[in-house]
Image (cartoon, rainbow, N blue to C red):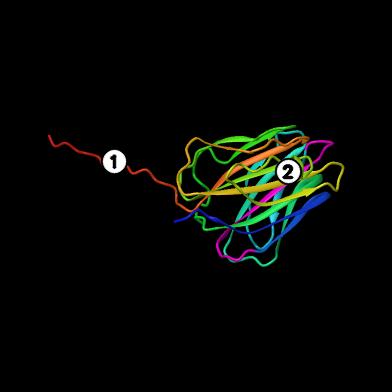
Amino acid sequence: MAAPTIDGSVGDQRSTASSGTVTLTTTQTNDIIIIVAYCENPGSAAPTVTSVTGGGLTFALRCRSNGSSHGNLEVWWALAPSALSSVTFTVNYTGTFDDATFLAYGVHGCNTAAPWDSNAGLPQKQSYNGAATPSFTLNTSQSDDLILFSNGVLASSSAIPADPSGFTNITSKSNGGGAAAASSRSSCKGVTSVQSGVTVAASAAGSGNNGGECILDVLTANSAVIPQRRPQVFTMC
């Protein structure tokens, strides 16, 4: 068995609205579709996502990170039984954002019944302001995983911290069409062994951002390991 792999990716943007769209094409059946939505609103708290719709898929919120000043990063996911041909997904918000970016990609080779690594410490999230280097300590419960590192900042693309060492960029997008700017980026790393106490950190600090959010999560090709119960031993008397 091998770690899951990326199957198609795209980024899009929108300014001064309460929804946005992103259109994705994939080539494989039974992909996990990931939507990474980041928005900023410099005048007040950033709105949150209420739903992701499109393609007849059922999306669920995986993680939301919005503890910084005026930024909100969310990861939503769904199972796509069939390959996607220019399918448009709509991300709906509770209110109006200044700028937003939307990343979408497919991941092939996951355990479709339970695609996320079962470790209780996942997902992880972090909020930061100004120059910062997001850092996590990663523990997983399964082998053959794909580690996902997503980042969003209230700033131009130059303020996004660089990908962690050994990670490959999936897709990114920057939008400066409003009063400020929103930029996001997702990267990944495939591993074949269980991870224990591994540091996952951006390899360079961003600067000039006022609403940094980061989410670390893991998709798996394997089923959760169910501990075997020790058989009972009965003593005859």
Q: Residue 136 lies in what quarter of the image? A: top right
- Which sits in the foreground, 59 or 13? 13
Which amino acid type is marked by label 1?
Answer: Arg
**Residue sticking out furthest to the left:** 237
Residue drawn 80% across and 45% down? Answer: 95
Residue 29 lies in the magenta-colored region:
yes
Side of 22 where 96 appears, left or right: right
What's the magenta region? Answer: 26-45
In the displayed structure, would residue 70 be above or below residue 218?
Answer: above
User: If you read the primary sequence from the N terminus, does the residue marked by circle 2 or circle 1 appear first?
Assistant: 2
Instruction: Give the class, few, some or many, for how many residues have Cα within 10 Å of label 2's Cα (few <14, many ≥20).
Output: many
Residue drawn 73% across and 43% down? Answer: 48
- In the rendering, at what x and y percent does residue 125 appear? 62, 37
- In the rendering, at what x and y percent does residue 78 appear? 61, 55
Which quadrant, please, contains the C terminus?
A: top left
Residue 64 lies in the magenta-colored region:
no
Instruction: Give the class, few, some or many, for how many residues have Cα within 10 Å of label 1's Cα (few <14, many ≥20).
Output: few
Residue drawn 69% across and 47% down? Answer: 185
Q: Which residue is mark 2?
A: 48
In the displayed structure, would residue 29 be above or below residue 157?
Answer: below
Which amino acid type is marked by label 2?
Answer: Thr
| Helix, strand or loop at mark 1 | loop
In three-dimensional space, the C-alpha distance between marks 2 and 1, rounded to whole angstroms, equals 47 Å
Which quadrant, please, contains the N terminus?
A: bottom left
**Residue sticking out furthest to the right:** 179
In the displayed structure, would residue 200 be above or below residue 18?
Answer: above
Q: Which residue is mark 1?
A: 230
| Helix, strand or loop at mark 2 | loop
| Label number found at residue 120 | none
- In the rendering, at what x and y percent does residue 206 appear? 72, 37
- In the rendering, at what x and y percent does residue 50 appear? 71, 48
